[in-house]
Amino acid sequence: MRHIWIALIVSLRSGLAICVALLALAAGPAAGQEIRPTLDKIKENGVVQLGYRETSRPFSFRGSDGQPAGFSIDLCLQVVGALRESLKLPGLKVAWVPVTPADRIPKLVKGTIDLECGSTTITFGRMEQVAFSHMISVDGGSLLATADSGIGTVKDLAGKRVGVIPNTTTEKALTAALAGASIQATVIPVAEHGEGLRSLEEGRLDAYASDRLLLAGLMATVKNPAKLRLSGEFFSYEPYGLMMRRGDNAFQARVNRTLSQLYRSGLVQIYERWFGPFENASPLVKALYLLHSWPD
């Protein structure tokens, strides 16, 4: 009888070991893919996959030629140039992948993109899932409204229809601003900046809430800007960064080194291409680049 129990225990242990091994095999590739060093991935494939937004002008948008363009795009191309040199990969290619507010983090975590070149606000909540580069700009939440609506500030939104992209820092800040001012407005979700602008032009919204620089970029694309009004009020603080996978210190250091070198010399030309004379930049923006000009 004793030998039967011994055989049974051995059999159970063997079965348990097989189950553990099968679970490890099932989990292994996914976990391995998530923590795979980005620099190794780039060297093996000869391609760096960059995420971009299609309507986040002037940071990241699809240009008239169908190619990604914008301030963040130019910064990412500087990073690619530095990678070609440091990795000794002169033929390193770029694969552009469109992303939205809803899928930018999942695409990054899954490895669909290696670096997001958009207009993403750095938050502690997002840092639980991803990592960020040095700050690349600073902005604040504001409103783009139809001229006929009479909207100039959050307090003017009472009884009005205001669009905002869900699950963004702007949505949270707008909700807090409305509550703080005891204003009742109809908040309407939109998927992307382009939809927000079209809804304004077609009369489905009275105002659209987003970061002010992005709203100014949208306003620059309309045929009749006089029909819209850009608010001078800010209801949030939005520090932008390039987004990458968490725990990849080597890649993050390469990105930040490139940005610091650029901030020390070479930034002005890129900045002025999208925002106008650098001398007119706010003291806060100038301080941002100075404080992130880290030494090698």
Image: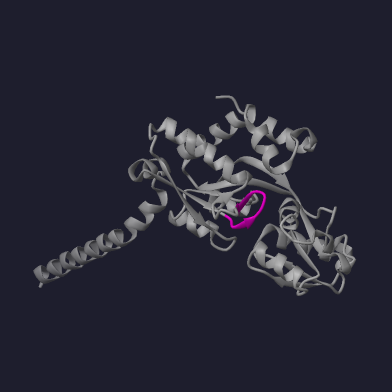
Choose between 48 and 184: the one closer to the eye: 48
In this view, 158 is above or below 271: below
**Splitting the image into 4 quarters, where does residue 201 fall?**
bottom right
Q: Position of residue 160 (x, y in %)?
A: 84, 72
Q: Is residue 182 visible?
A: no
Choose between 114 and 224: the one closer to the eye: 224
Choose between 277 and 138: the one closer to the eye: 277
On-image quarter of the N terminus:
bottom left
User: Residue placed at 37% from the left, 45% from the top?
Assistant: 41
The single residue placed furthest to the top in the displayed view is 296
On-image quarter of the C terminus:
top right
**Splitting the image into 4 quarters, where does residue 152 fall?**
bottom right
- Residue 277 highlighted magenta (yes or no): no
In this view, 288 is above or below 62: above
Q: Position of residue 262 (x, y in %)?
A: 60, 31
The structure's colour scheme is one colour
294 sits left or right of 177 in the view: left
Q: Position of residue 231 (x, y in %)?
A: 84, 56
**Splitting the image into 4 quarters, where does residue 280 fall?**
top right
In this view, 170 is above or below 124: below
157 sits left or right of 268 in the view: right
Region rendered in magenta = 53-61
In this view, 106 is above or below 266: below
155 sits left or right of 253 in the view: right
Task: Tally the numbered discs.
Answer: 0
User: Residue placed at 73% from the left, 48% from the top?
Assistant: 139
- Residue 57 highlighted magenta (yes or no): yes
User: Residue placed at 81% from the left, 64% from the top?
Assistant: 145
Q: Position of residue 128 (x, y in %)?
A: 56, 52
